[in-house]
């Protein structure tokens, strides 16, 4: 990963999603388009949520779709989408507005991505991110620099 985590290639703002499964597919589609995951990755994430519950919702407003490397990861990647309308996961009362999908090829290479996600949550940036409409604004907000 470089210093600028989010670029035009891995971010989409104000995405329309029918439900949580559609939101996962749309976030993971950016990873697939950039060659980080194969076509089964999103389905694996969805199957895990169905089996284990919405473990990918790590704080109110944010989900981090991901699954084990052997479930379709081809490289270390990250994508971010904000949703036009928040979506709900079954059993959770708080809607999700931001999805940061990521892939990893082992248990360590994605740690920089996790640090960025933790920074976003700890600094209370989820609502701010959900209302941003520019890559530059997003990277400035999270301290990733500009392009």
Image (cartoon, rainbow, N blue to C red):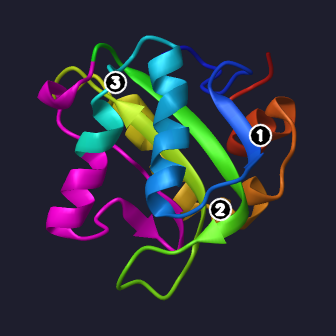
Q: Is residue 109 above or below residue 22?
A: above
Residue 26, horizontal then vertical, whole percent: 55, 40
- The numbered mark, 3 or 1, whose residue comes first in the sequence reads 3
The residue labelled by disc 1 is 138
Observer-nearest of 48 and 137: 48
In the rendered structure, the answer to whether residue 79 lies left or right of residue 14 reads: left
Above/below status of 36 relative to 6: above
The answer to whether the residues at label 3 and label 1 have Cβ atoms under 8 Å apart is no
| Mark pair 2, 3: CA separation | 28 Å
- The magenta stretch is 45-73
Image side of residue 35 versus residue 110, left or right: right
Q: CA distance from mark 2 to mark 1?
A: 11 Å
Q: Quadrant of residue 146?
A: top right
Q: Residue at x 80, y 31 (%)?
A: 135
Of callouts 2 and 1, which one flags the residue occurring earlier in the amino acid sequence?
Answer: 2
Residue beneath disc 3: 39
Find residue 57 and report its horizontal and vertical position in percent: 40, 65
SS label for mark 1? helix
């Amino acid at each position: 990963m470089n210093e600028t985590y989010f670029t035009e290639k891995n971010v989409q703002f104000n995405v329309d999603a029918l439900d949580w499964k559609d939101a996962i597919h749309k976030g993971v589609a950016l990873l697939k388009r950039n060659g980080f995951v194969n076509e089964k990755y999103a389905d694996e994430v969805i199957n895990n949520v169905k089996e284990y519950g919405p473990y990918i919702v790590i704080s109110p407003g944010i989900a981090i779709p991901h699954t084990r490397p052997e479930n379709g990861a081809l490289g270390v990647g990250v994508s971010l989408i904000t949703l036009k309308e928040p979506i709900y996961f079954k059993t959770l009362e708080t809607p999700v507005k931001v999805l940061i999908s990521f892939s990893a090829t082992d248990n360590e290479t994605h740690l920089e991505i996790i640090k960025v996600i933790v920074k976003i949550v700890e600094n209370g940036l989820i609502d701010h991110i959900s209302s941003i409409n520019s890559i530059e604004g997003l990277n400035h907000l999270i301290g990733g620099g500009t392009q």
